[in-house]
Image (cartoon, coloured by chain):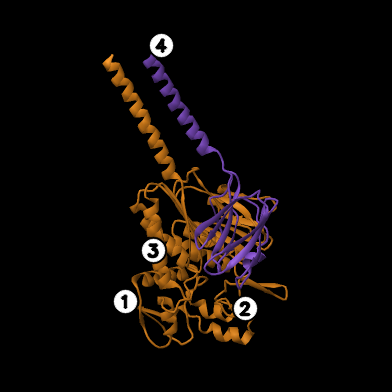
Chain colours: A orange, B purple
Amino acid sequence: MNKKIIFVLLIIAVLTISAFVVIKNRTDSEYLTTEIYSMNTVIQINISGKDKKDATDAVTQEINFLNQKFDDFSPQSDVSKINDNAGKNAVEVDNVTIEIISKALECYKETDGAFNISVAPLSKLWGFKGNELRVPLESEIKQTINLVNINDLIIEGNKVMLRKTGEAIDLGGIAKGYTLDKIKEILPKYNLKSAIINMGGNILTYGISNKGNWLIGIKNPREDGVVGKITIKGSKFISTSGDYEKYFIENGKRYCHIIDPSTGLPSDKIVSVTVVSDKGYLGDAFSTAFFVLGKEKSLELANKSGVEIIGFDKNLNPFFTDGIKNEVNIEKGG
Amino acid sequence: MKKGDKIIVSLLVLFVAFFIFERYVFSKSKADSVIIRSDGTIVKDIPLKDNGEYLIKSKEGELTFIIQSQEVKVIESTCPDKLCTKQGWISKQGESIICLPNRISITITGGNNVVDSTTY
């Protein structure tokens, strides 16, 4: 009789404990969603797992730290110091700034100059740096294009200098992807289930989603809502460049914020291109380069560099690399 | 059955009921709602069926949005670029209107058949 009671109590204890474990797991696997404003955009951090709170704090801290170094709208940033001292002094900068510039130079080489951080004077001329948006005169463009020269960016140790006054760099096309790389290095230090972080359209997926695969929407370049969906397995980076985020229309023509460094004019070969890659900085920089290069050259370069792309031409017809064809679902009418 | 046996059986039934209930509650999709964040914090969670006009304030400014027949639109904002008012109606789960200068976001959530995030 006594044995029977002990046995029953044991079963009840086991059941009670498993009930608690089930509840705890449910709570842990729910996403902790945090929204912060940094890098001149909105950032959504969704993390699930036991350490989600600590991981979110660490991620937020990292974003704010990198933003302090890279934000060209803040006069104290490394980038502003480099730009303000163009043609004058070499400026000592943080290791992360040296690293991101080196990666930007690597992307410049691999894209034959289509991705170029020294394009900033042209962006400013067209008004995309907070000044008045306008179509400049041809002579102004010709003059300004002389200030776009990546070889004038000199790095020695931790010191950086731009050779001529008026030259400037802008890390806007690589900083978000690079930051996501840094976040991906931080996340494994915590006991987490999965995470998805969206930095102004640049996404890091980490681990296995609560539903299995991740489902990522691609913004419709001409209407509200999404134009297609990509199924992503595990940890990846997804970046998009398009002509619909920052642009202006004059005399019926659309001028977007991505300037072709070779012509000095806003790129208009395609309307949007999304890159899926294993490196955040590369996906970010290459999406800009692909937008400048257009369909054929992009597909060629994507195949060469082992990234997958989905793009939309001017008629909103999609084009893909072979590796992602079966993972993409284009919405009707898209 | 003895009294003790009855207790055991009812306890077991209770546990089984708990596990079934737990699965049911968590797998059920939540009703569509509109989540509003101001300066990164959730300040309002309104069912999408609640038609009306709502004023949201943040440290930077304020905006007014309306919910009408399951659709959401920002109609007024103190921000300089007015991109939020130009965006027009949103109605699908996962869609949002973000006012960067005011640091206010309005997102439609709910359902199961929705993307995890959108690239742009």
| Residue B42 in picture, x, y percent from top left | 52, 56
Tell me the CA gap for discs 1 and 4.
Answer: 85 Å
Q: Assess disc 4: are there few (<14), some (14-19) or many (≥20) residues with their C-alpha within 10 Å of its C-alpha.
A: few
Q: Can residue B120 be seen here?
A: no
Tell me the CA gap for discs 3 and 4.
Answer: 64 Å
Q: Is residue A334 above or below residue A83?
A: above
In the displayed structure, does residue A72 sit left or right of residue A246? left
> Amino acid under label 2?
Leu
Q: Is residue B52 above or below residue A149?
A: above
> The disc numbered 1 marks a residue on which chain?
A
In the displayed structure, does residue B108 sit left or right of residue A305? right
| Residue A154 in picture, x, y percent from top left | 39, 80
Q: Earlier in the sequence, mark 3 or mark 2?
A: 3
Q: Assess disc 3: are there few (<14), some (14-19) or many (≥20) residues with their C-alpha within 10 Å of its C-alpha.
A: some
Name the residue beneath numbered marker 1: A157
> Amino acid under label 1?
Gly
Tell me the CA gap for discs 3 and 2.
Answer: 33 Å
> Amino acid under label 3?
Glu
